[in-house]
Image: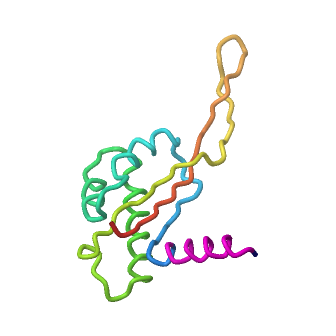
Protein backbone atom coordinates (compact mmCIF):
# COMPACT_ATOMS: atom_id res chain seq x y z
CA UNK A 1 0.00 0.00 0.00
CA UNK A 2 1.34 3.43 -0.96
CA UNK A 3 1.98 6.21 1.52
CA UNK A 4 -0.95 8.42 0.44
CA UNK A 5 -3.35 5.50 0.39
CA UNK A 6 -2.27 4.43 3.89
CA UNK A 7 -2.65 8.00 5.23
CA UNK A 8 -6.15 8.22 3.78
CA UNK A 9 -7.10 4.83 5.21
CA UNK A 10 -5.81 5.87 8.65
CA UNK A 11 -7.77 9.13 8.45
CA UNK A 12 -10.99 7.27 7.56
CA UNK A 13 -10.40 4.86 10.46
CA UNK A 14 -10.05 7.76 12.89
CA UNK A 15 -13.26 9.34 11.58
CA UNK A 16 -15.15 6.07 12.07
CA UNK A 17 -14.04 5.82 15.71
CA UNK A 18 -16.14 8.82 16.74
CA UNK A 19 -19.20 7.94 14.65
CA UNK A 20 -21.71 5.13 15.13
CA UNK A 21 -24.18 3.51 12.77
CA UNK A 22 -27.15 1.16 12.72
CA UNK A 23 -28.91 -0.49 9.81
CA UNK A 24 -32.33 -1.94 9.12
CA UNK A 25 -32.56 -4.46 6.29
CA UNK A 26 -35.50 -5.66 4.20
CA UNK A 27 -38.18 -3.57 5.90
CA UNK A 28 -41.46 -4.10 3.98
CA UNK A 29 -42.33 -0.49 3.17
CA UNK A 30 -41.69 1.26 -0.11
CA UNK A 31 -38.48 3.32 -0.12
CA UNK A 32 -40.39 6.42 -1.21
CA UNK A 33 -42.57 6.38 1.91
CA UNK A 34 -39.55 5.78 4.15
CA UNK A 35 -37.56 8.62 2.53
CA UNK A 36 -40.32 11.10 3.35
CA UNK A 37 -39.74 10.51 7.06
CA UNK A 38 -35.96 10.09 6.77
CA UNK A 39 -35.58 13.51 5.11
CA UNK A 40 -37.23 15.15 8.12
CA UNK A 41 -34.60 13.98 10.63
CA UNK A 42 -31.47 14.23 8.47
CA UNK A 43 -29.00 16.69 10.04
CA UNK A 44 -31.01 17.15 13.25
CA UNK A 45 -29.75 16.67 16.79
CA UNK A 46 -30.45 13.18 18.12
CA UNK A 47 -32.82 14.17 20.94
CA UNK A 48 -34.76 16.49 18.64
CA UNK A 49 -34.97 13.77 15.96
CA UNK A 50 -36.33 11.25 18.50
CA UNK A 51 -39.05 13.69 19.56
CA UNK A 52 -39.97 14.40 15.94
CA UNK A 53 -40.24 10.69 15.11
CA UNK A 54 -42.44 10.08 18.14
CA UNK A 55 -45.11 12.49 16.84
CA UNK A 56 -44.95 11.91 13.08
CA UNK A 57 -48.12 9.98 12.14
CA UNK A 58 -46.57 8.05 9.21
CA UNK A 59 -46.23 4.28 9.52
CA UNK A 60 -42.49 4.52 8.74
CA UNK A 61 -41.70 6.64 11.80
CA UNK A 62 -41.90 3.72 14.27
CA UNK A 63 -39.12 1.56 12.75
CA UNK A 64 -36.97 4.67 12.20
CA UNK A 65 -37.38 5.62 15.86
CA UNK A 66 -36.32 2.12 16.91
CA UNK A 67 -33.35 2.25 14.52
CA UNK A 68 -32.29 5.66 15.85
CA UNK A 69 -32.41 4.30 19.41
CA UNK A 70 -30.16 1.43 18.29
CA UNK A 71 -27.68 3.87 16.73
CA UNK A 72 -27.68 5.91 19.96
CA UNK A 73 -26.91 2.76 21.96
CA UNK A 74 -24.05 1.96 19.54
CA UNK A 75 -22.69 5.50 19.95
CA UNK A 76 -22.83 5.23 23.74
CA UNK A 77 -21.02 1.88 23.61
CA UNK A 78 -18.19 3.48 21.58
CA UNK A 79 -18.03 6.65 23.69
CA UNK A 80 -18.58 5.41 27.22
CA UNK A 81 -18.68 8.13 29.85
CA UNK A 82 -19.93 10.85 27.49
CA UNK A 83 -23.42 12.33 27.61
CA UNK A 84 -25.17 12.30 24.24
CA UNK A 85 -26.85 15.69 24.76
CA UNK A 86 -23.65 17.40 25.89
CA UNK A 87 -21.68 15.95 22.96
CA UNK A 88 -24.05 17.51 20.35
CA UNK A 89 -24.53 14.27 18.42
CA UNK A 90 -26.42 14.70 15.14
CA UNK A 91 -27.84 12.41 12.48
CA UNK A 92 -24.97 12.87 10.04
CA UNK A 93 -26.36 10.67 7.31
CA UNK A 94 -29.44 8.56 6.74
CA UNK A 95 -29.74 6.45 3.60
CA UNK A 96 -32.80 4.62 2.33
CA UNK A 97 -31.93 2.11 -0.38
CA UNK A 98 -34.06 -0.25 -2.42
CA UNK A 99 -34.19 -3.87 -1.26
CA UNK A 100 -35.87 -6.92 -2.77
CA UNK A 101 -39.24 -6.59 -4.46
CA UNK A 102 -41.80 -9.37 -4.12
CA UNK A 103 -43.79 -9.81 -7.32
CA UNK A 104 -47.37 -10.96 -6.91
CA UNK A 105 -50.30 -11.29 -9.29
CA UNK A 106 -53.69 -9.66 -8.90
CA UNK A 107 -56.72 -10.70 -10.94
CA UNK A 108 -57.85 -8.21 -13.56
CA UNK A 109 -60.92 -8.01 -15.82
CA UNK A 110 -61.47 -10.34 -18.77
CA UNK A 111 -59.16 -13.07 -17.50
CA UNK A 112 -56.07 -10.91 -17.38
CA UNK A 113 -53.62 -10.48 -14.51
CA UNK A 114 -51.87 -7.40 -13.20
CA UNK A 115 -48.55 -7.48 -11.41
CA UNK A 116 -48.35 -6.17 -7.84
CA UNK A 117 -44.89 -5.12 -6.69
CA UNK A 118 -44.44 -5.31 -2.91
CA UNK A 119 -41.39 -3.15 -2.29
CA UNK A 120 -39.01 -3.16 0.65
CA UNK A 121 -35.98 -1.11 1.68
CA UNK A 122 -32.70 -0.92 3.61
CA UNK A 123 -32.09 2.01 5.99
CA UNK A 124 -28.70 3.06 7.41
CA UNK A 125 -28.27 5.79 10.05
CA UNK A 126 -24.87 7.33 10.85
CA UNK A 127 -24.45 9.46 14.00
CA UNK A 128 -21.53 11.82 14.59
CA UNK A 129 -20.57 14.84 16.67
CA UNK A 130 -21.48 18.28 15.37
Q: Is residue 117 above or below residue 66?
A: above
Main SS class of the magenta portion in the image: helix
Q: Quadrant of residue 67?
A: bottom left
Q: Residue furthest top?
A: 110
Residue at the image point whose x is 37% and y is 60% from the top:
65
Residue at the image point whose x is 46% and y is 55% from the top:
94
Q: Residue furthest right?
A: 1
What is the x, y in percent for residue 122? 56, 53
Who is closer to the viewer here, 128 or 4?
Answer: 4
Q: Is residue 80 left or right of residue 121?
A: left
The answer to if 109 sits in the magenta stretch is no
Q: Is residue 38 left or right of residue 95?
A: left
What is the x, y in percent for residue 114? 67, 23
Q: Is residue 50 above or below residue 100?
A: below
What is the x, y in percent for residue 44? 30, 56
* Numbered range of the magenta stretch: 2-15
Q: Is residue 40 above or below residue 114?
A: below
Residue at the image point whose x is 46% and y is 61% from the top:
125
Q: Quadrant of the N terminus?
A: bottom right
The answer to if 8 sits in the magenta stretch is yes
Amino acid sequence: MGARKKEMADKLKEDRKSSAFASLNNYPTSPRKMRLVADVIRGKEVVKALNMLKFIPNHSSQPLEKLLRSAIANWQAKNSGEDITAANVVVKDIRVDVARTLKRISPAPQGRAHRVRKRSNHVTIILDKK
